[in-house]
């Protein structure tokens, strides 16, 4: 690649580290020229080895400039996007605003829309540039903490539904149903068409349901459980979660921002820390927190097993199993690499994450993820007993102090900064693309 095509020599690195007005122009020009190189090449799946090398060089060169630009200006960029911290933008809103106000920094909505129509293996990989952006934003103490706060606020959808839910105690969100009974908000994952395999739709519904449970004044404790399935193999039986929807991943329906990052910084983080509200009457804490119980029927695979690490109490049917098949899928299992070693130790974590070990609830090793193992016929009663225990008046305060000691906000923030970049890179690595192709050709991803 020529210097003229890429605009990435030492002088260009210096330019993007200079004063912000000049730096943003230099970055925009470099990105425009790199885009021109890509536009002149055939589509991703039809490129020759030389053309693939040219595309990789063009993208790599301008990505180096993006890194240099953000290393120098990330807080100024974030301050401009959020009006000096007075606006709380969620991940998607922040990325979209950045694409408009800092051309070339992250992909445009048009680029992302074009990518969505393609299978994962046929994408250009523009999400890696989003990974770079969020890596630097989350890596900054001030900007990263502000973004975490933005993601802990209730969603507009939840605020719209809250009055009706508080009155009726029920809401059907599509892939998740929520019902309040006996002071407990019962969240039922009901994607019976895919064994509760997660996709952006379920992440959206889960975050809405978690917000409703946390904000509802009649709820003291939350429960998450899988619903009854219609799949022939599990017909009439409850299933907790089959993890990430691999068919959606292959088809391009799993995005870095709207799924992988939103899931971790949205509803899973809210399960742990609560929802952030601006209420002068809550002078003692901006967070509304409640204890959470999970009940595992059938299996908790991948993302399902990840969830268990943030619950206060986990029950599992004696015939259920757990696994984190990250090595098989080729991606990073969310924040499990951050949380699991703390509760289970380094050796067990490596067996589970790197080795893909499958663990039955009745095995001794399951104690790292499960508090109680119950015969399936007795699980309903055990769930009710647990919900009653976790309604105690001192639970929330002690829970808050335990979480404060176990997981600092800044440690989580720095982990998620690295996760944003490494997960983006993983999604477009050749071995992952080969894996999702193989998974997509199977008639069913039903575990055995």
Image: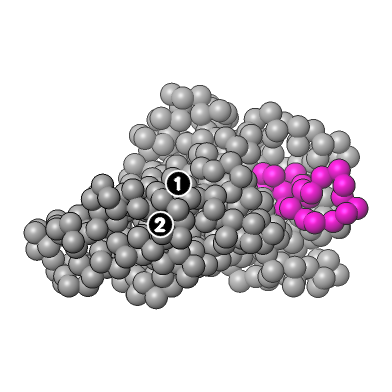
State the SS at label 1. Answer: helix
Residue 22 place in picture, x, y as percent: 41, 59
Q: Are marks 1 and 2 in contact (CB under 8 Å)?
A: yes
Q: Nearer the viewer, residue 26 or 175?
A: 26
Quadrant of res 390: top right
Residue 441 place in picture, x, y as percent: 27, 63
Q: Nearer the viewer, residue 380 or 387?
A: 387
In the rendered image, residue 375 lying in the magenta stretch gets the answer no
Q: Nearer the viewer, residue 77 or 204?
A: 77
Q: Which residues are magenta?
A: 271-296
Residue 147 place in picture, x, y as percent: 60, 52
Q: Nearer the viewer, residue 111 or 122?
A: 111
Q: Which residue is mark 1?
A: 72
Tell me how far mark 1 sits from mark 2, CA to CA. 10 Å
Classify 31 as above or below 370.
below
Which quadrant holds the N terminus? bottom left
- Give the crowd class for mark 1: few <14, some 14-19, many >=20 residues within 10 Å: some
Q: From where the camera sits, is residue 386 visible?
A: yes
The residue sitting at 41% across, 36% down in the picture is: 353
Q: Which residue is mark 2?
A: 23
Q: From where the camera sits, is residue 297 visible?
A: no
The residue sitting at 18% across, 57% down in the picture is: 3
In the rendered image, residue 284 lying in the magenta stretch gets the answer yes
């Amino acid at each position: 690649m020529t210097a003229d095509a890429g605009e990435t020599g030492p002088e260009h690195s210096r330019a993007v580290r200079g004063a912000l007005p000049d730096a943003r122009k230099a970055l925009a020009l470099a990105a425009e020229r790199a885009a021109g190189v890509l536009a002149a090449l055939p589509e991703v799946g039809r490129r020759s080895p030389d053309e693939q090398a040219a595309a990789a060089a063009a993208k790599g060169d301008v990505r180096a400039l993006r890194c240099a630009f953000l290393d120098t200006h990330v807080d100024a960029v974030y301050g401009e996007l959020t009006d000096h911290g007075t606006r709380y933008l969620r991940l998607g809103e922040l990325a979209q605003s950045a694409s408009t106000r800092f051309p070339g920094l992250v992909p445009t909505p048009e680029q992302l829309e074009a990518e969505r129509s393609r299978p994962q293996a046929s994408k250009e990989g523009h999400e890696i540039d989003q990974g770079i952006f969020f890596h630097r934003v989350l890596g900054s103490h001030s900007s990263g903490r502000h973004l975490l706060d933005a993601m802990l606020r209730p969603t507009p959808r939840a605020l719209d539904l809250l009055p009706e839910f508080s009155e009726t105690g029920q809401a059907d969100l599509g892939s998740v149903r929520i019902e309040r009974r006996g002071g407990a908000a019962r969240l039922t994952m009901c994607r019976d068409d895919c064994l509760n395999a997660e996709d952006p739709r379920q992440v959206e519904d889960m975050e809405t349901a978690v917000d409703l449970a946390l904000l509802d004044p009649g709820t003291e404790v939350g429960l998450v459980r899988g619903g009854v399935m219609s799949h022939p193999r599990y017909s009439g039986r409850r299933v907790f979660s089959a993890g990430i929807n691999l068919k959606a991943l292959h088809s391009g329906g799993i995005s870095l921002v709207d799924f992988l990052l939103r899931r971790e910084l949205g509803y899973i983080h809210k399960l742990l820390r609560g929802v952030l509200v601006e209420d002068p009457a809550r002078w003692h804490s901006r967070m509304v927190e409640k204890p959470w119980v999970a009940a595992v029927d059938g299996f908790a695979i991948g993302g399902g097993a990840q969830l268990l690490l943030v619950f206060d109490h986990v029950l599992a049917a004696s015939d259920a199993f757990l696994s984190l098949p990250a090595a098989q899928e080729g991606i990073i299992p969310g924040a499990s690499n951050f949380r699991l070693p703390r509760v289970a130790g380094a050796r067990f974590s490596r067996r589970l994450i790197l080795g893909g070990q499958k663990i039955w609830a009745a095995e001794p090793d399951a104690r790292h993820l499960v508090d109680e193992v119950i015969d399936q016929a007795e699980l309903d009663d055990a769930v009710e007993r647990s919900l009653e225990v976790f309604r105690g008046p001192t639970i929330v305060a002690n829970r808050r102090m335990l979480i404060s000691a176990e997981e600092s906000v800044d440690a989580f923030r720095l982990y998620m900064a690295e996760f944003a970049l490494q997960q983006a890179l993983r999604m477009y690595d050749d071995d992952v693309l080969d894996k999702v192709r193989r998974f997509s050709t199977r008639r069913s991803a039903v575990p055995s």
